[in-house]
Amino acid sequence: MKVPALFALLAASFKAITAHPLDAIDLDNSPNAAQVLEAAGFKIIPTTFTGPWGSNGEDLALTGTIQEVVEQVKKLNPNYDFGLPEHHSTSQSSSGGDPDPDDDMVDLQPEIEVANADCSKGEWANLDRIKQGIDYLRVVPKDHAVMKGKGCGRVSCSNNSAIYLCWEPRTDRQEYHRTWNYVADYAVTVTDIVCPRLGGKHLQTKGKIWDPMGMGVLVTADKC
């Protein structure tokens, strides 16, 4: 079942605030998402982002979550302007998740399939911090997400609220390339379309969604 107009009518009910308040993530008892993923057979792989962040506009490859990379760039090149939005986005990108033009193995018209979502996955995370991470993924990186083998990488984490990018190959291909907008679109599908939110002083969100090639985006609480 595909996402678009049909599910716009269902979004309001999915977003309804439940009767179980949760005001904030417990900083001392947040789960270690990496250990959970490793126990499920995924290799944890550090995430690397590349962009023209050098003082002379040269490309730099920096490792860490997107927030950690932003902080590294601020130290290396304080004058660099990321152009980050003041308000968090609430919709999918207009690109629809364009594939890497240099990867002829990627489907030309990928579509998000709601049937491939599991809202029971993960632990409750701060919605606002997840939205911030989604915005960072859309604006900051200039490269593409590259997945190799069965593994997961933490691409965003702030205030114990994380986004993990995973891949569980469903064919014998060795690599899978997607734009970061494509990854962000899947995260938005979890937070805004298919998974319910938990109410309280701070809205909470969680869930995992897969694309047809086995890429998974997990929204969850995590230590950071």
Image: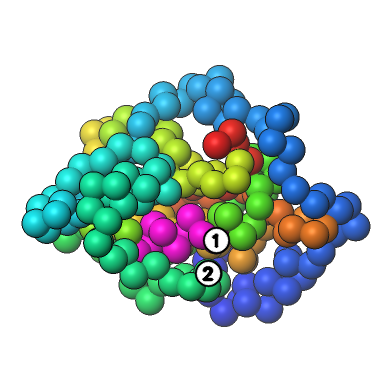
Residue 42, quarter of picture: top left
136 with respect to 196 (left or right): left
Residue neighbourhood size for the residue with mark 1, other residues' Cα within 10 Å, grouped as few (<14), some (14–19), many (≥20):
many
Q: Secondary structure at mark 1?
A: helix
Residue 118 versus residue 166: which sits nearer the camera?
A: 166
Please tell me the numbered disc located at residue 88.
2
Residue 4 versus residue 201: which sits nearer the camera?
A: 201
Residue 180 versus residue 222: which sits nearer the camera?
A: 222
Q: Residue at x 41, y 24 (%)?
A: 43
Residue 128, quarter of picture: bottom right
Residue neighbourhood size for the residue with mark 2, other residues' Cα within 10 Å, grouped as few (<14), some (14–19), many (≥20):
some
> Is-magenta flag for residue 132?
yes
Which percent across, then down, holds residue 84?
39, 67
Q: Which residue is mark 1?
A: 131
The disc, 2 or 1, on the residue closer to the chain's N-terminal end is: 2
* Quadrant in the picture for the N terminus: bottom right
Q: Tell me which amino acid carries mark 1.
A: Lys
Q: Secondary structure at mark 2?
A: loop
Which percent across, then down, holds residue 100?
22, 57
Q: Residue at x 61, y 41 (%)?
A: 160
**Residue 40 visible here:** no
Q: Which residues are magenta?
A: 131-139
Label 1 near label 2: C-beta < 8 Å?
yes
Q: Tell me which amino acid carries mark 2.
A: His
